[in-house]
Image (cartoon, rainbow, N blue to C red):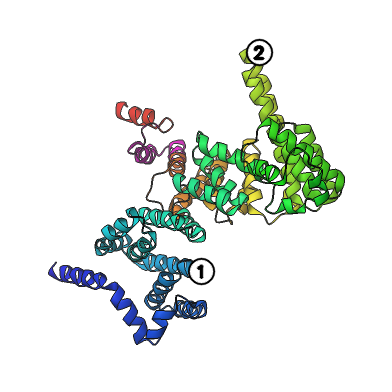
Amino acid sequence: MPTFFFEFISKLYFHLFDEYYSYNYLLALNVLNKSTVMEYSKSSEKTLRLYEKAQEAFKRNNLDYAIKILMTVVEFSPQFIKARHLLRLIEMKKLERSKAVLLKRFIGNMLSIPYYPIAYFYFYRGQYDKALSFYEKILLNDPVNIIVLTTLGNSALELDMVDTAIETFETIRRIIPSHIKNLMKLGIIYKDRTGELEKAKECFTTILQHDKENHAARKAVSDVSALQTIETGSYDDLSSSFLTKVKDLDYTDIAEKKMRAVKSEEDLQILIKDTEEAHRQEPQNSKTIIELASYYLQAKDYQSAIAYYKKALDLTPEDYTIVKMIMNAEMSQFDNTILELAKSVLPSEEKEQQIKELETEKRKVAEYYLEHIVEQKPADKELRYQLGRLYFEMNKIDKAIKEFQLAVQEPRYRLRAHNYLGLCFMAAKMFDLAEVQFTTALKESGKNVMDTFTKEIIYNLAAVYENTGHIGKAVDQYKEIYKVDIGFKDVADKIRQTYHS
């Protein structure tokens, strides 16, 4: 006990003077000289050389040396994203190598106690640049500290260091892929700050996979879909002759209407009219045709939207993304029809029957398009995952298994593909294979947060045990959920039955 105490005090002492030691450590190794320390914030060449030295140290497995260099690099070049990414990677690697991860994190947090008040003092004073360096010192000892990473990302945003913020929030995403608030923030950055609409949509749809009732995410998906076909700089492609024909609106008015996430009916009618004129000027311009189709889609004129998307496909038949646009337009048409039917005054039974038929037809149409797209892009694991889900919904279990076995190779969908494989094997009464998939998903998730997805996997694993007569094991799994979420599915009923049987 005394030895542990003195080791702890020694480490704490050295951390209090970390800035002094980090500089002198580098100087002693001839990485920096005094003039370099004064100048290299102005010299990208010297910063790059330091980064390369850190890479070399990393390759030689000299992680501490690499970290020391990278800490200095990000201190003086905070927007050097590659350096920050490598720093985080090495910190994670060091943590993973530790035999007692939780103990290491606990000690790391204790060692970082002096930095917390300083970091938050600068943060709340609005001195975000100073706060950044202290957050990095905390992360040295606990690189998976979600609270600190979140505040670091927020500080970077306040400094308009968007790339740094993205790197930080993506780090959180790698640690907890289902962190709702983080996904929402990341999606908003991609949508509003960088214009990376596909990445934004992925963030928002991931939220809906975990929380189907999340109205903010659902609206965000709708907004992104509306913007998705309007690429950055597309306005420059409009000819000057077309712009001069716009009598009621000047260029900035049109551009402003195009950039609105939610457009009024009047906006859409103006944009449709203007884009139709552009299409008449350049009938072979597929970008203009796709833009026109997107406006019709937002105006819920599905037939016109689909017709124009097909026209664009005729011009570029090799572009599978247009096939996806056609599919999405047809899916939106189905959804709108189902929604209108649900609001109708038809008798309940008749209404339910018609909705059921429409949903069946919708799946068949989606199947047709997805199979066609997968034929064109057989290596796209995201498409494989989507097709597997569709097959599962259609009870085409063998086909679904094949797609999920391919989708499991994609890191973003690996855990979900394992879960679906487990559900497929359960449907086929292959409970031993299902158990392997669910336990693999739990093991590989490495999460210590009981989110909705984790609860789903545990629930499915419990169902396997229940179906195979291992009631004790099933109850143990149900209890894991019950301890944190009594309202999850029918877990409460199952636990009560156990205590009353």
- State which quadrant residue 290 falls in: top right
Please, what is the three-letter code of the amino acid marked with disc 1?
A: Lys
Query: Would you say residue 98 sits in the magenta stretch?
Result: no
Q: Residues within 10 Å of mark 2 (few under 14, many from 20)?
A: few
Q: Which residues are magenta?
A: 462-487
Query: Would you say residue 484 sits in the magenta stretch?
Result: yes
Please, what is the three-letter code of the amino acid marked with disc 2?
A: Leu
- Residue at label 2? 346
In the image, what residue occupies the spot 12% across and 69% down?
Answer: 2
Q: CA distance from mark 1 to mark 2?
A: 60 Å
In the image, 220 versus 264, the foreground residue is 264
* Tag shown at residue 82: 1
- State which quadrant residue 140 falls in: bottom left
121 vs 177, left or right, is: left
Query: What secondary structure do most residues of the magenta stretch adopt?
Result: helix
327 vs 461, left or right, is: right
- State which quadrant residue 156 falls in: bottom left
115 vs 224, left or right, is: left
Q: How many numbered marks have been drawn onto this rendered protein structure?
A: 2
